[in-house]
Image (cartoon, grey):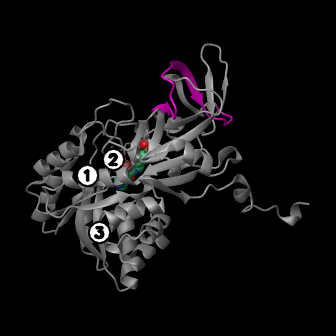
Amino acid sequence: MDHFQLRDGVLYAEDVPMPVIAEDVGTPVYIYSRATLVRHARVFRDALSGLKHPHIAFAVKANPNLAVLRVLANEGYGADVVSGGELTRALAAGMKPEDIVFSGVGKTHAELQQGLEEGIGQFNIESEEEGYELAAIARRMGKRAACALRVNPDVDARTHEKISTGKRENKFGVPLDKAQEIYTALAGEDGLDMRGIAIHIGSQLADLEPLETAFGKVGELIAALRAGGCTVTHADLGGGLGVPYKAGEELPQPAEYGAMVERVTKDWDVTLMFEPGRVIAGNAGVLLTRVIRVKRGIERPFVVVDAAMNDLARPAMYGAWHDFEAVEPTGEKTISHIVGPICETGDTFAMDRECDVLTADDLAVFRTAGAYGATMASSYNSRGFVAEVLVDGDKYAVVADRIAAGAIMDAERVPDWLD
Ligand code: LLP
């Protein structure tokens, strides 16, 4: 359920007609709905209500906008961060340091140190090497770092290969069959408090079965670690729950996920942690765009919109589908190609898509753009960075300014020795 609905023939974001935002802020622009974010945050939390004190850390990479993070902080969410930049944002948005988990295969020395200085709740370490480095930094600072060891369970998440993370050949985590040895070795380090296991097998999962298989392996590992004398008090089950990108698509509901987790983990006796991203933010955002012109094609028209692959990279990167709708649909449908202005064929949002008839200057939206949308933007083709707006009932605010191409150019210089 989201709060982007037609009213009297016009698409609204909550109680704000989208043309009002387009006039005021310009296009392309991401629009987020506070009510939708809150709803998703609560549905996910409620799905886990059968668990004892679950810890939910929003995967900041999905949508790092400060206002979005604040909405989630107000809902009691912590943050899963993967860089010093995300850590700084999560803190700036009001997330408590102890509710922050630091994931990622390439945390730098400076980032490990930053995490310790800020007193974050947990490091999810992804290799033995990282563990020793963190231990040394912590010792030097007179601290102990609470850690989970991320394991790679060698499970195929059956999602797009670029966002699948739990197969043996992927770079993430330590191999399951080495996990006990590494955990035991790291548990002997003064600077570390090895307290748990972490896992994340991929994103946009359309099926719970791979998750259940992976969690089962974590359960066996926890038992083996305890039998070997190690302490395990936490298990971080990552994120990954998919969302519908096409109207009518059915995906596992958070409640089904919660029931599965409860069943699989009932004897674990740990604090469970979660890192949802897309399921919270995906359908809480749209990308509003304006048609530049409709170009006659050989078989179909090309609807050229002012958003491009630099603003919403998912179709170009993963062949991803985003529903595309007119803001003021006439009811008439046609089949078109939807493309952006960037000079490569990859800048295609959809081919042969049945959609509303559109003409120059009409407004349209790409749906399900609240996760992995603005955050993946670039300035390719010397386009600026897209603006972001948060709607709350009948009010809205620009929560990220558009960064003009000129402002990006201002950060560049030509050394005088070139002349
Ligand atoms: N935890 C870890 C360690 C992750 O790597 C990720 C996502 C998440 C949690 C959140 O996963 P979610 O609940 O959102 O599925 N850019 C891609 C998605 C990349 C996901 C990367 N990791 C896309 O647009 O589909």
Tell me which amino acid carries mark 1: Phe
In this picture, residue 210 sits left or right of residue 6: left
Secondary element type, mark 1? helix
Secondary element type, mark 2? helix
Mark closer to the chain start, 3 or 2? 3
Give the camera-side residue of 12 and 243: 12
The residue furthest front is: 8
Percent coordinates x, y for residue 139 in the rendering: 36, 82
Q: Is residue 335 magenta?
A: yes
Q: Between tags 1 and 3, which lies in front? A: 1
Q: Are marks 2 and 1 in contact (CB under 8 Å)?
A: yes
Percent coordinates x, y for residue 348 in the rendering: 57, 31
In this picture, residue 138 sits left or right of residue 286: left
How many numbered marks have been drawn onto this rendered protein structure? 3
Find out if the beta carbon at label 2 lies less than 8 Å from the nearest ligand 1 atom. yes
Residue that label 1 marks: 44
Percent coordinates x, y for residue 138 in the rendering: 37, 79
Residue that label 3 marks: 147
- Residue at 12% in and 64% down: 226
Label 2 to label 1, Cα distance in Å? 8 Å
Percent coordinates x, y for residue 88 in the rendering: 47, 70
Residue that label 2 marks: 279
Label 1 to label 3, Cα distance in Å? 25 Å
Mark closer to the chain start, 1 or 3? 1
Q: Which mark is residue 339?
A: none
Q: Is residue 102 visible?
A: no
Badge 2 crowding class, 10 Å Cα cut-off, few under 14, some 14 to 19, many 20 or more, is many
Q: Is residue 334 visible?
A: yes
Magenta stretch in the rendered image: 323-344
Label 3 to label 2, Cα distance in Å? 26 Å
Secondary element type, mark 3? strand
Badge 3 crowding class, 10 Å Cα cut-off, few under 14, some 14 to 19, many 20 or more, is many
